[in-house]
């Protein structure tokens, strides 16, 4: 591969938040961002799908457009993620920023792999190919019973929110299974705990990861 095409080296820290709809991810992303900025870090807060201009078009198509078969849906999420990582996440990490994303590839493995039944291994392979292997340093799972999550949602449900109880139960189990298999990357928190307690637990874990990243 010519040198110009090699991914930029990473110096920053990459953090993702995962969990069902209504788990409070966007609140915790914002609180972590404030905490890191106050400590003097360059912070990039972003999301999937829709962290880029192209991503916002793809987000509308996948969440609010016509019916899509499961493979098309998986490929749209993968395309959003490939462009997000290449154009925003990797350059920010190369500058030394802390990148915090509301959802990343574990959402595809859980929602498309297990929820839609495409197969977790296949969707993981597709997702890792899309991002040339980039995994977060820390992934926070805000775990919540889908029945409770549904009660917290406002507005018209999108295509994924409308997918049914079994789908959301499979998705939750997939997140918990992935987290149990890789405790070095994942922090699992009970999303019914108070917002400030959750933020403190997240801050502690990310602080520890930053201290390790600085030493290495
Ligand atoms: P999100 O932005 O978290 O929803 P909202 O802003 O409505 O709270 O995610 C949108 C939906 O997309 C959510 O139901 C989960 C789903 N999703 C997937 O199915 N696969 C993926 O890879 C990603 C990133 C999200």
Image: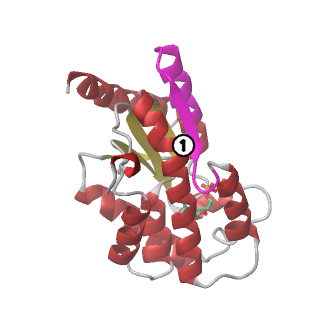
Q: Residue at x 54, y 37 (%)?
A: 28
Vertical comparison of 17 with 124: above or below: above
* Residue with the most extreme front position: 2
Image coordinates for residue 65, horizontal then vertical, percent: 76, 73
Q: Which picture quadrant has residue 77? A: bottom right
* Image quarter of residue 164: bottom right
Residue at point 52%, 58% (across, down): 81
Residue at the location (60% across, 57% down)? 49
| Figure check: 6 above or below 111 | above
The quarter of the image that holds ligand 1 is bottom right
Residue 158 in view in this figure: no
Residue 1 appearing in the image: yes
Compared across the picture, whether 116 is left or right of 135 comes to right
The percent position of residue 13, horizontal first and vertical second, equals 38, 34
Task: Tell me where the magenta segment starts and ends, as one range.
Answer: 30-50
- Residue that lies at the very extreme toward the left in this rendered image: 216
Q: Of helix, strand and loop, which one carries label 1? A: helix
Most foreground residue, 177 or 117: 117
- Does mark 1 have its CB less than 8 Å from ligand 1? no
The image shows residue 24 at horizontal and vertical percentages of: 58, 45
Residue 63 shown left or right of residue 28 in the figure: right
Identify residue for label 1. Answer: 88
Q: Residue at x 56, y 23 (%)?
A: 34
């Amino acid at each position: 591969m010519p040198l110009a095409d090699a991914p930029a080296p990473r110096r920053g820290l990459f953090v993702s938040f995962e969990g069902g709809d209504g788990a409070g991810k966007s609140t915790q992303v914002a609180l972590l961002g404030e905490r890191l900025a106050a400590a003097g870090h360059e912070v990039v807060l972003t999301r999937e799908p829709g962290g880029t201009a192209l991503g916002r078009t793809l987000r509308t198509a996948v969440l609010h457009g016509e019916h899509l078969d499961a493979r098309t849906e998986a490929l749209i999420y993968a395309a959003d993620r490939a462009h997000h990582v290449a154009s925003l996440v990797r350059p920010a990490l190369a500058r030394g920023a802390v990148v915090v994303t509301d959802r990343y590839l574990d959402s595809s493995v859980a929602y498309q792999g297990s929820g839609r039944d495409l197969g977790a291994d296949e969707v993981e392979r597709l997702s890792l190919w899309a991002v040339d292997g980039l995994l977060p340093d820390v992934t926070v799972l805000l775990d919540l019973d889908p029945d409770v999550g549904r009660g917290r949602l406002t507005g018209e449900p999108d295509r994924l929110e409308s997918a049914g109880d079994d789908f959301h139960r499979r998705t939750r189990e997939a997140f918990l299974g992935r987290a149990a298999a890789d405790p070095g990357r994942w922090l699992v928190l009970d999303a019914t705990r108070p917002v400030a307690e959750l933020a403190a637990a997240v801050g502690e874990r990310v602080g520890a990861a930053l201290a390790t990243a600085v030493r290495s």
